[in-house]
Amino acid sequence: MSDPLRIAAAVEGPTDFIVLSAAIESLLAGEEFEFQTLQPELSAAFEPQGGKTGLGWSGVYRWCHQTSDQGNGRVSQSPLLAFHDLLVVQVDADVAGMTYESGKIKDEAGDLPCEKPCPPPSDTTDALRLVVLR
């Protein structure tokens, strides 16, 4: 018997974690997995506390940068992820219409907003995916 797939998540909030957990369970079709939220931090009562990074898309942004710093510029090298097989980073598509200033973030990349005319929605989500990967 193999070990369960260990999945970590950086999401905007606890509801996103619940939805993703159900989606992954469906995709894995009965395969055993462990799913842990790393962002946002949760209290013992499962209420979001935000911690140092905060909630929402800006919390995910700050968490990714903090985790990248811990991994010498690479999220994948962070010690925080040493015991996970997969990381899911989730932000809502409406982030494509946001600015860094609206999230109280100083970022010189200039890649937000990245919203594109719709349809198709994939033009916007593809542009947002590049922002998240950066």
Image: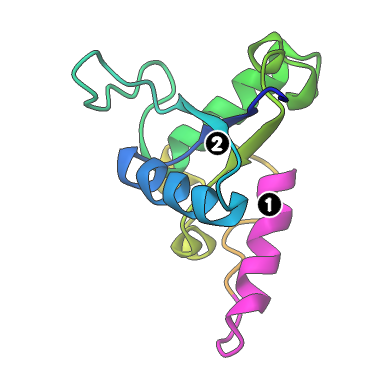
Q: Residue at x 62, y 66 (%)?
A: 114
**Which secondary structure type mostly characterizes the magenta part of the structure?**
helix
Q: Give the side of residue 95 with respect to residue 88, left or right.
A: left
The quadrant of the image that shows the C terminus is top right
Magenta stretch: residue 117 in it? yes
Magenta stretch: residue 68 in it? no
Q: State which region is magenta.
A: 116-134
Helix, strand or loop at label 2? It is: helix
Label 1 amino acid? Val
Q: Give the side of residue 30 with respect to residue 80, left or right.
A: left
The quadrant of the image that shows the N terminus is top right
Q: Is residue 35 shown above or below 51?
A: below
Cα distance between the residues tagged 2 and 1: 10 Å
Q: Nearer the viewer, residue 69 or 100?
A: 69
Q: Is residue 125 shown above or below 108?
A: below
Q: Residue at x 58, y 86 (%)?
A: 117
Q: Give the side of residue 100 with respect to residue 79, left or right.
A: left
Helix, strand or loop at label 1? It is: helix
Q: Residue at x 36, y 17 (%)?
A: 51
Task: Bin the neighbour count of mark 2 within 10 Å (Cα to Cα): few under 14, some 14-19, many 20 and up.
Answer: many
Residue located beneath label 1 in the image: 131
Q: Give the side of residue 116 with respect to residue 52, left or right.
A: right
Q: Position of residue 30 (x, y in %)?
A: 55, 46
